[in-house]
Image: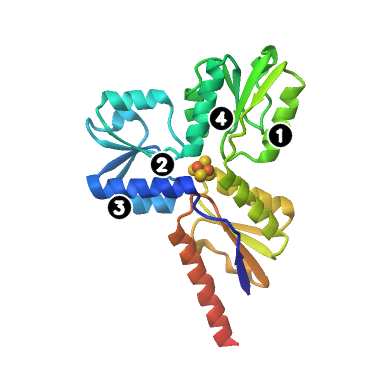
Amino acid sequence: MNYVMADPTGLCFGVRRAIDQLEDALRLHGEVYALGSPIHNPQEVRRLEKCGLRVVRTPQEVPEGGTVFIRAHGVPPEDLDLLQVRHTNLVDGTCPFVRKAQEEAKRLSREGYFVVIVGDTDHPEVKGIRGHVEGKVAVINPALPEEPGILSSSRVGVVCQTTLREESLIKIVSTLLTRTEELHVCNTICRATMLRQDSVRKLSKKVDGIIVMGGRNSANTHKLVQIVQSSGTPVQWIEQAEELDWRWVEGKNTLGIAAGASTPDWLIHELHHKLESSRLSKGMDG
Ligand code: F3S
């Protein structure tokens, strides 16, 4: 059995940068609070918790003067205001691409557009972008019926969740085009996401099955799995090497490996190690 890595795959620039910032802060302060889970990967969060990370749900749970880490998804400005009142020391891990989506949303609303955010309504990144809008706003989840209020607006500005699939944006923009007089689209899909999706799409044509590694709470990992599924290639979604179903691996000559943008390198190394050991032991048996 051979295996091929999707390229690129695994940690994106924004999450790698955020983890580095968080590790630096932990070394410096010993204890760091994160508003919500800082990375959509349970194994990595557990590792960081052992180093002093404390995950809280609201700014009110952060002690006065504590150090707070803002995750790559960003937060709404109201949360920053609440943290400032508590005199916290802020470590801002907001990914620059997410920051761009927040700023575009703010600019469009200041210019009088009805802002449409295309993305998952409940995703923290979308909530953060929404919080930056100063006027009318609606979130369109590509999987759900559209927001009726948009139909009464003649000037619509669009931004999207950075991890959105390009096809979803195109579909919604095409619909809006026929219903508005002026449509301003800022494509805020992150290239890291597109490249990872393309690489897995290509890989699925060349292999007998793909292992996708990443947190079950990771939207971008879920999208990689969906892409493989729609190609018809068998896929196995695991969070860590020990979950691998060896009966599924059996009989496949070439396996592909892909990982979500929040899957840390050490988990991918563990998977490599497991696959290599199995290959060696099979070689010895033979
Ligand atoms: Fe940033 Fe793109 Fe990653 S928005 S967090 S580099 S997927």
Residue 40 makes an appearance in the image: no
Which residue is painted at 47% across and 33% down in the image?
99
Q: Quadrant of residue 105?
A: top right
| Above or below, comparing residue 265 to residue 272 in the picture | above
**Residue 174 shown left or right of residue 190 in the figure:** right
Return the x and y of residue 42 as percentages of the image width and height.
Answer: 43, 50
Q: Which residue is mark 1?
A: 170
Q: Which label number is shown at residue 153?
A: none
Residue 54 makes an appearance in the image: yes
Front: mark 1 or 2: 1
Asked whether disc 4 touches disc 1, contact meaning CB atoms under 8 Å apart, the reply is no
Q: Which residue is mark 3?
A: 50
| Local secondary structure at mark 1 | helix
CA separation in Å, label 4 and label 3: 32 Å
Return the x and y of residue 225 as percentages of the image width and height.
Answer: 63, 51
Q: Quadrant of residue 35?
A: top left
Amino acid type for the residue under numbered disc 1: Ile
> In the picture, which quadrant includes the C terminus?
bottom right
Q: Which residue is mark 4?
A: 121
Chain-order first, disc 1 or disc 2? 2
Which residue is painted at 68% across and 36% down in the image?
168
CA separation in Å, label 4 and label 2: 18 Å
The one nearer the camera, 99 or 60, is 99
Return the x and y of residue 123 as percentages of the image width and height.
Answer: 52, 34
| Local secondary structure at mark 2 | loop
| Above or below, comparing residue 80 to residue 248 in the picture | above
Amino acid type for the residue under numbered disc 4: Thr
Amino acid type for the residue under numbered disc 2: Ser
Q: Which label number is shown at residue 37?
A: 2
Asked whether disc 1 touches disc 3, contact meaning CB atoms under 8 Å apart, the reply is no
